[in-house]
């Protein structure tokens, strides 16, 4: 039986094309799966923190506070980076309100301004407070010895 090389080559090229399409689908699915995994992890962490979901106007840690002040205050007690949505939800749960038509957009814009000011930094899909810089410059230390307090 004679082998028709042209047919075999055509079949191999068709198989190569199908495999290339499948590989492309797999490569497109990986980033989406990473996002879903990270979102599920963030939801589990948020559930552990048990942030209350009630919002009573005028009552709460962030009631009457602007986003520029509330966001760094909220992030100062955070142990991990929080997404814009998580920040918004945590602020709202603790009394923050906004007159903006799109309050989540206001939070996003404020985060960008705080980043420009060097107050927050983007970490992956989330935000963290920039750690305070500690000066180790000896000239910043007092040359006067501490006096023991009289008791």
Image: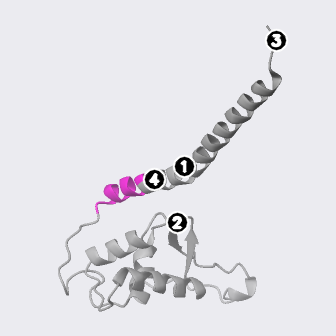
- Picture quadrant of residue 19: top right
Q: Which residue ends up furthest to the top in the rendered image?
A: 1
Viewer-proximal residue, 108 or 30? 30
Task: Check disc 3 and report the residue beneath it.
Answer: 2
Magenta stretch: includes residue 46: yes
> What crowding class fits label 3: few (fewer than 14 Cα within 10 Å), some (14-19), or many (20 or more)?
few
Question: Which circle's residue, 2 or 1, is located before the other in the chain?
Answer: 1
Nearest-to-viewer mark from 4 and 2: 4
Nearest-to-viewer mark from 4 and 3: 3
127, above or below 141, in the image: above
Looking at the rendered structure, which numbered label has been put on residue 29? 1
The Cα–Cα distance between marks 4 and 2, rounded to whole angstroms, is 12 Å
Question: Which circle's residue, 3 or 2, is located before the other in the chain?
Answer: 3
Position of the N terminus by quadrant: top right
The Cα–Cα distance between marks 3 and 2, rounded to whole angstroms, is 60 Å
60, above or below 42, in the image: below
Question: Which circle's residue, 4 or 2, is located before the other in the chain?
Answer: 4
Please provide the residue range marked out in magenta.
40-50
Nearest-to-viewer mark from 2 and 1: 1
Nearest-to-viewer mark from 1 and 3: 3
Disc 4 is placed on an element classified as: helix
Viewer-proximal residue, 37 or 72? 37
In contact (CB < 8 Å): disc 2 and disc 1: no
At x 56%, y 86%, the residue is 147
Looking at the rendered structure, which numbered label has been put on residue 36? 4
At x 43%, y 68%, the residue is 78
């Amino acid at each position: 039986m004679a082998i028709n090389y042209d047919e075999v080559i055509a079949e191999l090229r068709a198989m190569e094309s199908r495999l290339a399409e499948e590989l492309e689908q797999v490569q497109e699915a990986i980033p989406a799966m990473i996002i879903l995994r990270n979102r599920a992890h963030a939801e589990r962490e948020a559930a552990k923190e048990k942030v209350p979901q009630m919002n009573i106007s005028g009552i709460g840690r962030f009631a009457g506070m602007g986003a520029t002040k509330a966001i760094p205050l909220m992030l100062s007690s955070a142990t991990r980076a929080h997404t814009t949505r998580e920040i918004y939800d945590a602020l709202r749960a603790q009394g923050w309100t906004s007159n903006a038509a799109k309050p989540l957009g206001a939070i996003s814009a404020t985060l960008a301004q705080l980043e420009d000011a060097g107050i927050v930094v983007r970490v992956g899909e989330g935000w963290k407070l920039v750690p305070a810089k500690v000066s180790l410059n000896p000239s910043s230390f007092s040359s006067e010895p501490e006096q023991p307090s009289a008791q």
